[in-house]
Amino acid sequence: MKIFVTGVNGQLGHDVVNELIKRGHQAVGSDITDVYGGMQDGSFVVSAPYTKMDITDRETVERVLSEVQPEAVIHCAAWTAVDAAEDEENRPKVYAINVLGTENIARCVKALDAKMVYLSTDYVFNGQGEKPWEPDCKDYEPLSVYGATKLQGELQVMEYLEKYFIVRIAWVFGVNGKNFVKTMLNVGKTHDTVRVVMDQIGTPTYTFDLARLLCDMVETEKYGYYHATNEGGFISWYDFTKEIYRLAGLETQVIPVTTEEYGLSKAARPFNSRLDKSKLIENGFEPLPTWQDALKRYLKEIGEYQAENE
């Protein structure tokens, strides 16, 4: 299958392309830079073509996709800087990328009669309560610009397409790019203590594992809304940080604080990021491994795992 992947300079797009190549698919990667700007790990650069494409430019999107003629598009590109999205000067760009860019791609996917996978987020909900959000729940109430624009992106996909997978994810970490795990490792090496919120609850998602699931999906016609994170139970960012430091052999003291006490974020963060993933099993998809196992594999991958702690 020929599959076009947007946002390959990021964590998820990078892993998706490599997973597609492993499976023998014809993958084409794209991003906004002139050349591929992610990790030069060999497999991606050698095996998959790269094309520059600004998703906010409708004519460019139409030209590129009409030339490539993909059978499916996995749309990983997005504005994901949650706090920066709140800045007045950034809002037009956030809207252009997350909403108009998604609309541009959905229009072309429809013209090609192809499939589309759109990555969304738990931020489309209001983050209240303790019940896990179900994938087909329509009680949307985003609290941030980021969440609102990702929701509008979902609606664009729904408006134009019937053959789509909308996959909401949370707490993402991967090899290619910045993420919470890398930030905490850097802080832990330079500080004796670190304050981490303990009242925001969810489950981490390793892009290496998620990429496998997305490829499983695109090989089927089991369309619809899905939620996908690693298994292993619901935790707080405090719990996650404690495990990061344990596996990395860092003795940094982790101090639990409330979101209010932490008080550094411009954008409102969801307290309840629990996602109900039962629909995956119901439709025959293999769940992701536990986050504990994923974190261990990830730390080994980036050379931060200390085996003596196991």
Image (spheres, rainbow, N blue to C red):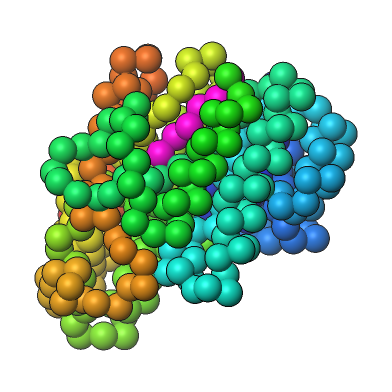
Give the x, y percent position of residue 55.
71, 49
- Is 166 within the magenta? yes
229 within the magenta span: no
Specify whether residue 16 is in view. no
| SS majority, magenta | strand
Closer-to-camera residue (26/93) = 93
Quarter of the image where the N terminus is located:
top right
Percent from the top left, x then y, of residue 3?
A: 69, 30
- Foreground of the two, 284 or 262: 262
Q: In this view, does 266 lie above or below 78?
A: below
Name the residue rendered at 15%, 60% in the picture: 199
In the displayed structure image, the side of residue 27 where residue 145 appears, left or right:
left
Q: Residue furthest bottom?
A: 191
Q: Where is residue 257 in the image (x, y as percent from the top left)?
A: 13, 72
Horizontal and vertical percent for residue 54? 75, 53
Relative height, residue 99 to residue 246 (above, below): above
Q: Specify start and end residues of the magenta stretch as a single range.
A: 163-168
> Would you place residue 274 above or below residue 224 in this image?
below
Please give left or right for residue 51 compared with residue 146 in the image: right
Tell which of 4 and 60 is nearer to you: 60
Q: Quadrant of residue 286?
A: top left
- Tell me the residue at 87%/34% (across/down): 67
